[in-house]
Structure formats: structure tokens, C-alpha cells
Image (spheres, grey):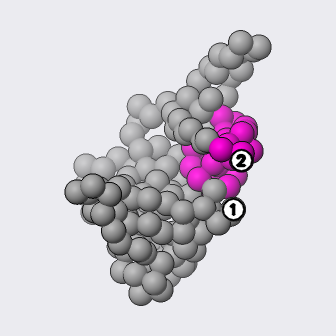
Amino acid sequence: LHPFYSVAALGPRGVELTRGHELLPGTGIGSPLDRLAAAGGLILLLGVGHDRSTTVHVGEFHAEAPYLEIPFDPAWPIGAEIVTADETRSVSYDRFPGCSRVFAVLEPPLRARGAIEDGLVGRANAQLVAGAAVIEETVALLGRDEAALLCADPGCYRCSRARTRLGR
């Protein structure tokens, strides 16, 4: 039911993984990707690299990155109405995932710890990695440098404002 970060989960724990997602920041603590990682779940990057891994955003939330309340874009929605058969509910959000341009910096430490299994699905390159490993490496990286996942593009709304806030 999340108005901005839809997920689907099949199987015996599908409802458990997704329950209440609409009440949380899309990739925050307790979100489906966080619950999946905590349960030992794996992330499959199919034809893309870690700069497309949404699980890194979950790691930003665990690290309490100091820029999470800066939206990706000034027009980024902060709320919505969720309409179900039973009710209409207004939700609002105050923390947001943002730019992922430099998330590939996490691949070398994940490889160094042996967390990535490479393969092919058809002709697409694939990487299989434990969600918990992605979150752990993200937290460790941001612990060393809180600006490590911010891109250098001055036109990037969130990253440029976060760099200014951090004095970088």
C-alpha cells in the first residue's frame, strides 16, 4: 500500500514482510527490505550494479545518515492518501531515500568479504548478496565518512544540500 515505494512479496511470509509498510519511510527501518534482510533474505541485482540497489538506502537509515530529511527533489511528495476497500488514510513522511549515483562504492568491500555471488540469468549479469551484508557495509562506510554516499553533482538537489550541511 505504500504510495511511493511499492513492493510485492509472495510466499508464506509475504504479508509479514509487507505489513504496515505504508506507514514507514519507503526504505526505512522496518520496511520490507529491512525485514527481508533481518530474516536472512538475499538481494538479486539482475543486469544492474549496486548503484541500483535499493537496500543501500535501508543502510542509510540504519546509519542515521544526517541528510535523510532532505528530499531527493524539492517537489518530492511528503504525504498521500491511501485508499483501501475499508478506509481512506492520510500518511506523511519526514525521511527520504535519495540519490544512488555513487552506491557502487559498496561493491569492493562486499566483494572483499565474499558477500557477492556472480552469475548469469539468461544473458544478464547477476549478483546475489545477502541484504544484511549490504546494510552492514553501508553502516560501516557511513561511520567512516558520513558523506561517502553523496554524489558530487552540484545539480543534485539532495546531495548538494547535504554536502553544504556537512561542510563539504
* Placement of 84 over or under 138, stated as above or below: above
* Placement of 147 over or under 113, stated as above or below: above
* Residue tagged 1: 39
Tell us which disc is closer to us: 1 or 2: 2
- The reply, left or right, for residue 81 in relation to residue 43 is right
Q: Residues within 10 Å of mark 1 (few under 14, many from 20)?
A: few
Quarter of the view holding residue 152:
bottom left
List x then y, in percent, for residue 80: 59, 24
Kind of residue indicated by mark 1: Ala
**Residue interval drawn in magenta:** 11-35
| Magenta stretch contains residue 10 | no
Determine the residue positioned at 55% across, 29% down. 3
Query: Residue 13: which numbered mark, if any?
Result: 2
Quarter of the view holding residue 83:
top right
Q: Toward the viewer: 161 or 75?
A: 75
Q: Answer yes or no: do the residues labelled 1 and 2 have beta carbons within 8 Å?
A: yes
Quadrant for the C terminus in the image = bottom left
The answer to whether residue 162 is seen in the rendering is no
Measure the alpha-carbon separation of dots 1 and 2.
10 Å
Q: Toward the viewer: 20 or 167?
A: 20
- The reply, left or right, for residue 141 in relation to residue 91 is left
Q: Toward the viewer: 164 or 111?
A: 111
Q: Toward the viewer: 90 or 73?
A: 90
Kind of residue indicated by mark 2: Arg
List x then y, in percent, for residue 135: 56, 68
Determine the residue positioned at 54% across, 53% down. 68
Number of numbered discs on residues: 2
Secondary element at tag 2: loop
